[in-house]
Image (cartoon, rainbow, N blue to C red):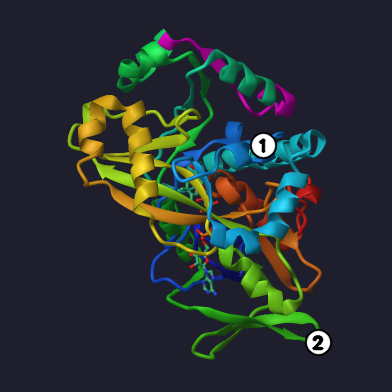
Amino acid sequence: MTIIGAGVVGATTALSLAERGLTVTVLDRHRQAAAETSHANGGGVTPGHAEPWNSPGIGKRLLSGSGAGEPFRIHAHALPGLVGWGLRFLWQSKASRYYANARHNTRLAVYSGQCLKRLRERHALAYHQYTDGSLELYFSRSELEHALKLRRQIDDPGVEIRVIDVDEVVAMEPALVPVAGRMAGAMLLPLHESGDACAFSAEMLRCAQQLGANIRLGAEIQRIEQRQGRVVGVRLQNDELLDADAVVVAAGCNSPALVRPLGLRLPIYPVKGYSATLELEQLELAPTIPLLDLEHRIVTARFGKRLRMAGLADFDGYNRSIRPDRIELLLESACALLPRLAEEIRSGRAEPWAGLRPMTPKGPPMLGPTRVPGLYLNTGHGSMGWTQAAGSAEVLADLLAEKAPAIDLAPYRP
Ligand SMILES: Cc1cc2nc3c(=O)[nH]c(=O)nc-3n(C[C@H](O)[C@H](O)[C@H](O)COP(=O)(O)OP(=O)(O)OC[C@H]3O[C@@H](n4cnc5c(N)ncnc54)[C@H](O)[C@@H]3O)c2cc1C
């Protein structure tokens, strides 16, 4: 079995397959694991926040606030390529469809959280994991109530939420003392975690390799080879042919380009996001609990001495450039949330990064067999790839090992 992609999704799939005793080769065009979208994401493993972005009314919200200084930005040059996907994104925002999609995304994310815990029990993993929950901060009572109503509609039994008052918030996270006066309250999600998805991906490859997986980094796939309608292998850029009885496409935003020659059109749009990672000098001023701040549209996570700040959504096609004005907006949002750290955040030391979220118009990813025999997908995880990686990997490995997956696959079928 061959996996295309050693991002967090492909690397975790490699380990799940190897654990089942299957022969697996994982290929990636970069010389290290997780060099694309999984490289410097927000770090949150957040099943309680897995709802898609297109909640009812998204059309109006995008029209009224998707400019230069806004968290959402639609670039004019990207419009022609966005129309088809965008209409489907809006179509899926109807309440009945949205809540169904939100439940499917949450179900997979909750299952994934359980799989991640079991992975840690089976393997000694080090990826700066933090496993004591996260805080979702609200600066207006009505926003907090709106968010609670949404969660109640999704109502997954695996999501635990506790509403806590501001005193409890600052007792848990003293870095928030300066903004406590403005805060309305928070949700504590005790099962949430955080960790460095890039380090985790490398750990997945290490463990898979120990179990016999063949890891080939720096190997770019030119195309997937077919014979008599069946997938038979992959052709590398250097023209080498690698035989395979099954190919799993876990190539993030490049998945559509890889499968298009086989007659498959995947509805994945690359939604760009940004992060900045700061090597902290004043550790005691920085938050340790992963934070999600919906007012400033920013998430933070701590990886040892580093603070990751991430957010924003640019519809900018496949343009991967790190736009300075967007990084500035991200950093200013971080300063507004963490004023005591403002000097450090503005010091110019934070490392900027941009990545493309492989987003489907519905929200849930595409998992499982395609109509091309031997071709499987594990892609389209959008803003939830790190949260859903372990569960998606288990589902796919179960399928390939001819075992029934633990969750119903119907909502994720390509
Ligand atoms: C700013 C930002 C913040 C985010 N925050 C979070 C978060 O807090 N929590 C969360 O759950 N998710 C988050 N996400 C989303 C998450 O990062 C993605 O869903 C996830 O990284 C997707 O992983 P992947 O393995 O599918 O794709 P990728 O990481 O992009 O991996 C795909 C791999 O395929 C390889 N590849 C592609 N084509 C070829 C080819 N032809 N030959 C060989 N190799 C190929 C690429 O080199 C790449 O390594 C965030 C994303 C962004 C941008």
Residue drawn 77% across the image and 66% down it: 370
Q: How many marks?
A: 2
Residue 60 bears which disc, if any? Answer: 1
At label 1, the amino acid type is Lys
Q: Is residue 216 above or below residue 85?
A: below
Measuring from the top left, give residue 411's x and y in whole percent: 78, 48
| Magenta segment | 151-166
The answer to whether 407 appears left or right of 71 in the picture is: right
Ligand 1 lies under 8 Å from the Cβ of mark 1: no
Q: Is residue 309 above or below residue 382?
A: above
At label 2, the amino acid type is Gln
| Quadrant including the N terminus | bottom right
Helix, strand or loop for disc 1 = helix
- Label 1 Cα neighbours within 10 Å, binned few <14 / some 14-19 / many ≥20: few
Residue drawn 57% across the image and 45% down it: 384
Measuring from the top left, give residue 17's x and y in whole percent: 61, 61
The answer to whether 393 appears left or right of 414 in the picture is: left
Q: Quadrant of residue 167?
A: top left
Q: Which residue occupies the foreground of this view, 316 or 222?
A: 316
In this rendering, does residue 126 appear at all? no
In this rendering, does residue 40 appear at all? yes
Residue 228 bears which disc, if any? Answer: 2
Residue drawn 54% across the image and 89% down it: 240
Do the CB atoms of the residues marked 2 and 1 lie less than 8 Å apart?
no
The answer to whether 218 appears left or right of 278 in the picture is: right
Q: Which residue occupies the foreground of this view, 8 or 292?
A: 292
Question: Does residue 153 belong to the magenta stretch?
Answer: yes
Measuring from the top left, give residue 210's x and y in whole percent: 45, 63
The answer to whether 131 appears left or right of 254 in the picture is: left
Question: Does residue 412 belong to the magenta stretch?
Answer: no
Measuring from the top left, give residue 226's x and y in whole percent: 72, 84
Q: Is residue 72 above or below residue 359?
A: above
